Image (cartoon, coloured by chain):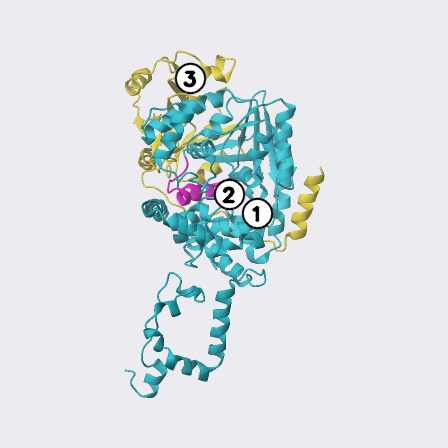
Chain colours: A cyan, B yellow
Amino acid sequence: MSTRHSTAAARFLKDREQEKWHDETLWLVRAKRDKMSRSLPEWETLRNLAASIKLYSNSHLADLLEQFEKNAAGNGAIVHWAKDAEEYNRIVYDLLKERNIKRLAKSKSMLAEECGMNSYLMERGIDVVETDLGERILQLMHLKPSHIVLPAIHIKRQQVGEMMEREMGTEKGNFDPTYLTHAARKNLREIFLNSDAAMTGVNFAVASTGEIVVCTNEGNADMGTSFPKLHIAAFGLEKIVPDLEALGVFTRLLARSGTGQPITSYTSHYRSPQNGGEFHIIIVDNGRSEILKNREHIRILNCIRCGECMNTCPVYRRSGGYSYTYFIPGPIGINLSMLKNPKLYSDNLSACSLCLSCSNVCPVKVDLGEQIYRWRQQLDGLGQANPVKKQISMGLKYLMDRPKVFNTALKFAPLANQMPRFVLYNKLNAWGKGRELPHFAKKSFNELWKNNQVK
Amino acid sequence: MGSREEILGNIRKNTLFSFEKPSYEIDSIKYEDKLQAFCDMLKVAGGQPVFMSPDDDLDKLISRLYPDAKRIASNLPDVKCAVYNPDEIENSRELKNTDLSVVSGAFGVAENGAVWIPLNVKYKALYFISESLVILLDKREIVHTMHEAYKRISGERYGYGLFMSGPSKTADIEQALVFGAHGPMSVSVVLY
């Protein structure tokens, strides 16, 4: 019995060339991260400090959010609270509808993705335009992101070129990334200049000042908010940090970990509405406050969405973001999906070799791999354990508990060496799928030891 | 206010542990030559450091850097080559088709080549909409790291501000690096 992840991964692996490119390109990003981390002697201390700040803020969320709200209001922003996706979508829609706004220039927000905001608004007649280049490409191709920081990492330049020929009238057959990027720049510039509202995500919300911080390389968040009167920003409540000095720690880690840059081109601090404008901030729960009581998984709230765990994951690199059944893939996605709905998303748990590379590089020290291991121990309780593997495990336990039976079985094991393949490699042997059985020795170690044959 | 109370109540009910606030003190990197490190990192970010000596003429320097720029915007009195003052226009959309903007930065960060710019023009659009951007920066105003940077701006009052490190960029098409995704294609930091 294969999980939905392994079935989808098998599809991804059919295109060997693409798989190799995907794997090697993401590994290059990981290598850039290593170069960055080694350029700072204090790197590991920074990671520890970042994790401690997150544990502090996530265990003082209510106080910090109240402080944020008070300070943001003092700056002239209007703060809203949304307990779930439905409420968040409705707040955004109402803000737009009340002002008769038809077009929203949107910069990247995984929260909007989580809440299905785009389709909610578009069904109600709002033209939502993604402005991050990767997100815009996917939107025009009617596809979803396959990575949280490099959303279009699975798309080839030819596909982008062909789509842009249709959508933006670019030259036929010109697939040059510089040409295509600059054509999109021209196209999106008109959107920026002619939108009535802008929406941004939030990388960090600062409690002590009530400001939000948005990090981009493209400058799309800043372009988007530069012209319309209305700016809506929304964040999942774990994005709160206590003060500006805490940002000193996170802004040093975020881009170095995620893309291997010392910092993003733009780290923009929004405090007050622009002259004559409105600034609305939506604080969203959508299940986050429930994670707090989950002792074993509380560190998931540390995540700053840098994407590094995807770049480093051998399974993600070789199976692609679409192989996962949750909208966030990779190690962090596996964990977030299990916290969202363990029955629905348990297929993703198979997408892990427990190599713990993710835990070792995570800038805020989320114990990603360890948490996946813990979830796996609960699979049986969830009724999601693979029945064939369960049989094998029970069989092995029977043998291990009975040394005599075990030794007898071992004596006959070499017989397997001569067995025809169909006897050994069939659907009863889930372990043999994609693996070769070992060649059994004629005599067991036990026998050799007893006969003094061990040197 | 229903959801607000519900969310805060839920958080308080579900918070099982309390972790102490850690000390932010950290033994962070100190560059032997901060200015050199700043210039190196700015180049890594795709920006261009340019030194100006006291005898240099700023306008000449700008025209040497951007000989093709015609519509130049600046609210700085020293920038004589500016053809308009962006603070005098009525609507930020009129900034469209600006070739070059000249603005000033408050300080630079050695570890990443970023310049802190607290909003010092009427429309922040100016930092992003022009094809090229020149940032004037006092070369004595360089800090080592972001820790120092944030210590420095703590307590400052700004409605908007940003750390800008080089030009706008993207690698969203097959990870090929392209400058000028939405903001300036080129950024020069003039160090005086």
Residue type highlighted by circle 1: Ser
What residue is drawn where x is 54% and y is 50%?
A337
On what subunit does the disc labeled 3 rest?
B
- Give the magenta range: A244-264
B127 sits left or right of A278 in the view:
left
Q: Quick one: label 1 or label 2, which is nearer the N terminus?
A: 1
The nearer-to-camera label among 1 and 2 is: 1
Disc 3: which residue: B76
Residue A405: give x, y in percent of width and height: 45, 82
Answer whether labels 2 and 3 touch (C-beta < 8 Å): no
Answer whether labels 1 and 2 touch (C-beta < 8 Å): yes
Residue toward you, B162 or B180: B180
Q: CA distance from mark 2 to mark 3?
A: 34 Å
- CA neighbours of label 2 inside 10 A, class few (<14), some (14 to 19), many (20+): many
Disc 2: which residue: A246
- CA neighbours of label 1 inside 10 A, class few (<14), some (14 to 19), many (20+): many
Residue toward you, B105 or A216: A216
Q: CA distance from mark 1 to mark 2?
A: 10 Å
Magenta stretch holds residue A206: no
Depicted A142 relative to depicted A396: above or below: above
